[in-house]
Image (cartoon, coloured by chain):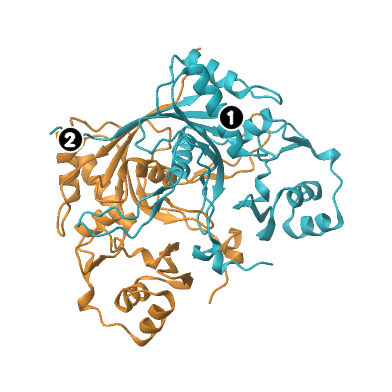
Chain colours: A cyan, B orange
Amino acid sequence: MQVVHPSLRMFGIRTPLIRPGDNIVDILIDALEKQGVELQDNDILVIAESPLATSENRLVRLEDVEPSKKAEELALEYQLDPREMELILQECDEIFGGVPGAALTITDGTLSPNAGIDSSNAPEGYVVLLPDDPQGSAEVIRRDIEKRCRCHVGVIVGDSRTQPLRLGCVGIALGSSGIVPVEDVRGSVDLFAKEMKITRKAVADNLVSAAQLLMGEAGESIPAVLIRGAPVQTTKESVGMPLFSPDECMYYSNIRKQ
Amino acid sequence: MQVVHPSLRMFGIRTPLIRPGDNIVDILIDALEKQGVELQDNDILVIAESPLATSENRLVRLEDVEPSKKAEELALEYQLDPREMELILQECDEIFGGVPGAALTITDGTLSPNAGIDSSNAPEGYVVLLPDDPQGSAEVIRRDIEKRCRCHVGVIVGDSRTQPLRLGCVGIALGSSGIVPVEDVRGSVDLFAKEMKITRKAVADNLVSAAQLLMGEAGESIPAVLIRGAPVQTTKESVGMPLFSPDECMYYSNIRKQ
C-alpha cells in the first residue's frame, strides 16, 4: 500500500486596486490568468473582506455620518471618532466593552472590534463596513466562478481578528461556500483508538489564517489567496458558518456585559 | 520589473507513534528522509504539542494522582475527573470559570481549556500535560536540526484552541524559534498610503493554523508539518512569544474572574 503524505500549495493573487462597483470575480479570474494559474477542482479561494466590501459599495464617507448622543458618549469612552462609533452602533448587535481604540462588539454573531469597521485600506476620510452578507457573497462568487471555470471551488470571505490575551491578528471566516467550514470530528478515534475529546475543527478559520501568511495586512495588493490540495470536506450544498450556542462557550459565560 | 507572486508549500510529516523518551528530531528527520523531502533554508516546522510532550515524558497516569478537596469541588462544578482537575490546578496560573467539560485557565500567560491537559492521543488512563517549556523545546529542536541539516529553520510548537463564540478549534503557537512570531506592522502603510491601524500579525499562530489543515486532530500520525516559502521574518536570535499587556486586551478587561 502506498502511503500518501498530505501536502498543499498556496498562491497569492495580486490584483489592481479594487474600487467600488468592481466585479471581484472578473478581477480574480483576470489576475489568475496573468499569473498563469488555472483553477482546478476543489481549489479554495480566500478573499479578504475589505476589498470585497469595497467592491460591494460598503465605503462610507465619515463626513456624511451624524453621530447620536450615545455615539458621542461611547466615542469618548473608547477614544474613537464619534462618527465611526455611530456606524459601529448601527452595524453591531451588541457592545460588550472595549479598550482605547476598540469597542468589543458582537456583529452577525461574531465577536469583533468596532463591528469590523476598518479605516485601513479605505480612502482618506472613509471607512469600509463589513460586507453586508459575507455568506451570501461567498455563495454568489462561488457559483459565478464555477460557471465560468467549470470546476468545483470553495470560496471563503476572511477577516482579521485579535484573540483574547494574545498579541497579533489571526484569520477568521465571515462566510464560506463549497466547503464544510467546521468539521465535526466527534466519533473519530485517536492514536489509541479512544474517542476524540476535541470535537470540531474550524477549517474555514484555519484556511483564512493560512491565507493571511501571503496576504499581509498593509498595501500589498494581495486581496485573495488560492489554496490547492487542502484535505477538507467539499460540498455542493449551501453550508454556512454554523451557529454557536453561547451556553457551550467557556469564554462567553465569563464575558460580562456592560 | 518582474512581479513576484508569493506562494508557499506545506508537507505533512507522517511518523510512527511517538513514545515517552523518543528523540523527536531523530523521528522527524527520519520521516522527512523517507518522504524524500530535504530541509532547505527558512523551512518552518510546526510540531504538535501532544506528541512533543509525550516524547518529553509528560504523560501522567491518573491513578497516581490524589485530588485535593478544592479539585473535588471544581471537578463537580465543571464535570471533570477530579484527578484531571487536580492536575489542572497544579499546571495553571489561574482559573476563570468554565463550562461542563472545560475549565477556562490561564497557563503560562495563555488562555486555554483545562490548562492544555489532553486525554486524547494518550494511552487509556493517562493524560498528556503541555510540554514543560514549549519555548525552550522549540529552541533546542531548532538548534539540533540546524546542526544536523546545515540550514536555518524555524520551529514552532503548536496547540489547538477554541475561540470565543466560535465553533471549532484553531491553531495557537506555544513556543517558536527561528522566526519572528508576532510581526509588528505599525508604521507600514495601506493601499492609500495611510498608516495601518492593525498593528501586529500573529504569524506563528497563523502558521500553526495552516499546519492544522494537514495535521488533523485524530489518529492520523501527522505530528508535524513542514511549511516552505512563507514570507515571514526569520531570525537567528532567540525571540520567544511576546508578553501581552492585559490592559491592551479588549477581551481580558471584560472577563470576570470567579
Q: Is residue B133 visible?
A: yes
Which residue sits at x=17%, y=53%? B18
Q: Earlier in the sequence, mark 1 or mark 2?
A: 2
Q: Is residue B193 visible?
A: no
Give the vertical position of B202 relative to B52 (above or below). above
Residue B62: image quadrant is bottom left
The amino acid beneath tag 1 is Val
Image coordinates for residue B66, horizontal then vertical, percent: 26, 82
In-image side of A248 versus A96 (left or right): left
**Which residue was labeled with disc 2?**
A3
Q: Callout 2: helix, strand or loop?
A: loop
Image coordinates for residue B129, horizontal then vertical, percent: 29, 65
Which residue sits at x=36%, y=87%? B69
In-image side of A70 versus A168 (left or right): right
Q: Give the residue furthest to the front.
A: A237
Q: Nearer the viewer, mark 1 or mark 2?
A: 1
Give the vertical position of B156 relative to B97 (above or below). above
In-image side of A83 versus A166 (left or right): right
Name the chain under label 1: A
**Which residue was labeled with disc 1?**
A140
